[in-house]
Image: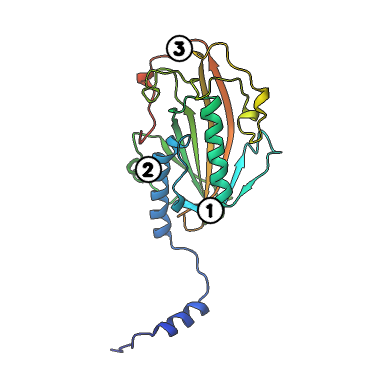
């Protein structure tokens, strides 16, 4: 039996610099993906109040706002601008548009990879508060690209998160806004008009698409798209039949 002497730190550094970059093994990627999936289920519902945890954000993260609906809106690059932009959006939405206690209710979550790494049992085990998770194989993706798409909507009138207040009870009053104004960071406040009746039910729907780094440990791209504003004068149906946001 051959006995190998332990390598000194200098030898380890030399070997590390000479070794080729191999693809990230599947097992750590799968574990990291599971962590990200559960983190998003817990944190996305509170994105109108808090940013995502910093340890899950790439330093070079890209934020894309309504690329399909408003392709002229510039792309935000870098973690500092990402966090600043999200804080601005939170302030805008909860000051003029929605109740500051409103949460994002996850209605569907899709994980997309070139080759399926999660079984149906894995998806069931990763689900929090009975969120609907499914997996989609997309051979056109790179073997080390993972996309997580989350469909969401904000609270309806009568939701427990609102504490008997209305969906449109924003901090500074309920104003008329369209989707373009809602996500435009240089909104001219003098052009805003107040709603005649803040008892109207106002719901915002949309999707988030999160693209992960090759190790599946951080978010590289966050896309907000397919946003729609729904306003109803009639109260919602029985909210007991509508799932509440996880982690609330």
- Mark 2 highlights which residue? 123
Q: CA–CA distance between discs 2 and 3?
A: 34 Å
- Mark 1 highlights which residue? 145
Tally of numbered tags: 3
> What colour scheme governs how the chains and residues are painted in the rendered image of this protein?
rainbow
SS for callout 2? helix
- For marks 1 and 3, give the one nearer the viewer: 3
- Mark 3 highlights which residue? 235
Towards the viewer: 98 or 202 = 98
Q: Is residue 133 above or below residue 169?
A: below
Crowd band around label 1 with a 10 angstrom C-alpha radius: few (<14), some (14–19), many (20+): some
- For marks 2 and 3, give the one nearer the viewer: 3
**Residue found 38% across the figure and 85% down from its top:** 7
In the picture provided, is 34 more to the left or to the right than 208?
left
Q: Quadrant of residue 109?
A: top left
Q: Of marks 2 and 3, which one's residue comes earlier in the chain? A: 2
**Residue found 67% across the figure and 24% down from its top:** 190
C-beta proximity under 8 Å, tags 1 and 3: no
**Residue found 42% across the figure and 14% down from its top:** 237
Crowd band around label 2 with a 10 angstrom C-alpha radius: few (<14), some (14–19), many (20+): some
Q: Of marks 1 and 3, which one's residue comes earlier in the chain? A: 1
Image location (x, y in percent) of residue 111? 47, 44
SS for callout 3? loop
Q: Of marks 1 and 2, which one's residue comes earlier in the chain? A: 2
Q: Is residue 205 visible?
A: no
Crowd band around label 3 with a 10 angstrom C-alpha radius: few (<14), some (14–19), many (20+): few
Q: CA–CA distance between discs 1 and 3?
A: 42 Å
Q: Is residue 215 visible?
A: yes
Q: CA–CA distance between discs 1 and 2?
A: 18 Å
Image location (x, y in percent) of residue 192? 64, 22
């Amino acid at each position: 039996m051959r006995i190998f002497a332990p390598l000194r730190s200098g030898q380890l550094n030399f070997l590390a610099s000479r070794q080729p970059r191999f693809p990230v093994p599947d097992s750590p990627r799968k574990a990291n993906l599971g962590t990200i999936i559960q983190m998003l289920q817990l944190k996305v519902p509170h994105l109108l109040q808090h940013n995502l945890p910093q340890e899950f954000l790439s330093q070079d993260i890209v934020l894309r706002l309504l690329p399909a609906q408003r392709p002229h809106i510039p792309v935000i690059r870098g973690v500092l601008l990402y966090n600043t932009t999200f804080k601005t959006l939170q302030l805008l939405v909860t000051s003029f548009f929605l109740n500051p206690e409103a949460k994002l209710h996850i209605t569907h979550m899709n994980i997309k990879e070139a080759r399926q790494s999660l079984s149906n049992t894995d998806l069931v085990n990763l689900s929090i508060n009975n969120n609907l998770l499914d997996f989609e194989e997309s051979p056109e993706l790179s073997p080390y690209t993972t996309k997580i798409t989350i469909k969401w909507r904000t609270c309806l009138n009568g939701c427990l998160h609102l504490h008997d207040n209305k969906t449109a009870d924003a901090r500074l009053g309920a104003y008329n806004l369209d989707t373009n104004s809602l996500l435009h960071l240089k909104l001219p406040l003098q052009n805003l008009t107040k709603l005649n009746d803040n008892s109207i039910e106002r719901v915002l729907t949309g999707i988030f698409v999160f693209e992960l780094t090759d190790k599946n440990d951080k978010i590289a791209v966050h896309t907000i798209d397919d946003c729609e504003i729904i306003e109803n004068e009639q109260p919602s149906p029985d909210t007991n039949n509508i799932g509440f946001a996880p982690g609330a």
